[in-house]
Structures are given as structure tokens and as C-alpha cells.
Image: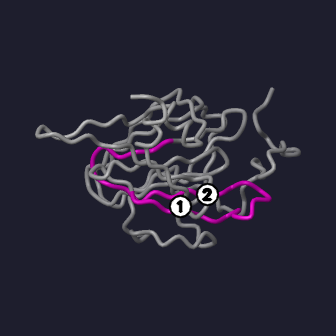
Amino acid sequence: MVRSEISRSLRVSPLAIPDVKLVVPPRHLDPRGYFSETFNRRALEDAGIDFEGVQDNQSFSQARGTVRGFHFQIPPTAQAKLIRVVHGSVFDVAVDIRRGSPTFGRHVIAILGAEGGEQLFIPAGFAHCLCTLKPDTEVLYKVDNYYSAEHERGFRWDDPDLAIAWPVLASAATLSDRDRNLPRFKDLEPVFFHDGREPVGANTGRQ
């Protein structure tokens, strides 16, 4: 298959915040089931996504209504993510945390499921959170920078300032103790800027 044919076979759609994109790889069906290239860097590049994954992560959540997030890493280990579901489905949310962005503090939502094979591309400068819609949900995602506990940050998933219509009540959600005690969105230090400049006086972890 030549390069242009690969690009045409991959569907990439910008969401309401265009930097976040829904990616749907093709599935080739036959009597046995299907075959799909779930990651092709060249095809993504042809579709306008410059992403080089260096680490794969996998999560398994037993209960429906399990929440993971909001999480992100600050420079110099900021991460872009490509997220997909291999079993079950999730309510996936990205929040723009780039100061000066016209969509700062706003969010986009995508429903990702194993049946449809949808993926969500979230660039650096966004925070990510998911809520499982089915029990026994497994999520795989690639990141373009390695995990660094020193640079990991987050904020409350149910922060009322974000006005996200979650599919689960806070009283019924399953969270880690760490995620339950994350700060409010308004208390975040300014780390990402829409124009790409470095933050002044922020603890970015640079040496």
C-alpha cells in the first residue's frame, strides 16, 4: 500500500477544540473477524498529527464509573497521548490548560469503545481524564515522553468550574485516593502557554 493510500484509509476528525482529534483506523473484515493497523506513524503524519510514541500504558478498571484523572505532565516531560479502548468503553475528556488559549479551561468529550476502534489524540498542553462506561474496561495509550513522577500534575475531575456533564455521580464514582485529593483547576500554576513561550517563575523541572 502506497503512502497516499494509507493516509486516505485513516479517518482523522478535529473536535470542538481542533487540536484534539478523533482518530479511526480502518478495519479490514473477513469471515474470521477483522484486521486493523492500530498505530501507523506515517499515516498520522500524513493526516497532520506529528506524534512519536515512546511508551505504552495500559489500565484495567473493574467497575463502571471508574474515574482516572485529570492528569498531565509539565515540561520538560510534557506528553501527547493517543488513547484507545480494547475492551469496554470510556467517556474521555480533554481540558485545555494553555494560558492565553481562546479555549483555555474548556473541554471536549469523546466516547471511545472497543467495538468502534476510535482513538483520541490529545496534544501536550491538555489534561486528560476518563470515566468507564462498562465494567472490565481496558484502555491502552501511547505517550511521546516517558513517565516522570516529578513532573506529574493533576486537578479534580468534578471541579464545578469546568461544568463537565459526567455520566456518573461523584458519590458513585470509583477513584484513587490521590485523584480524590487533587487541587482545583483554578489553583494550577501557569505552565503551558498558547503561544508556546516558557512560563515565568513556574516550577517546570528544567535543570
Identify the element where label 1 is drawn: loop
Please give the residue where the numbered disc 1 appears in the rendered image. Answer: 157
Quarter of the image for residue 50 reads: top right
Q: Residue 80: x and y, percent?
A: 59, 40
Q: Quadrant of the C terminus?
A: top right
| Image-based side of 146 in relation to 60, left or right | right
Which amino acid type is shown beneath numbered disc 2? Pro
Asked if the magenta segment contains residue 149, the reply would be no
Most distant residue in the left direction? 31
Residue found 44% across the figure and 28% down from its top = 2
Write down the quadrant of residue 84 in the picture: top left
Q: Secondary structure at mark 2?
A: loop
- Which residue corresponds to the image point at 48% horizontal and 30% vertical from the top-left? 3
Q: Observer-nearest residue: 121 or 74?
A: 121
What residue is pinned by disc 2? 18
Q: Are marks 1 and 2 in contact (CB under 8 Å)?
A: no
Expressed as whole percent of the image width and height from the top left, the position of residue 203 reads 79, 40
In the image, is residue 110 part of the stretch drawn in magenta? yes
Q: Earlier in the sequence, mark 1 or mark 2?
A: 2
Compared with 70, 41 (above or below) is: above
Q: Position of residue 29 (x, y in %)?
A: 21, 42
* Span highlighted in magenta in the image: 82-111
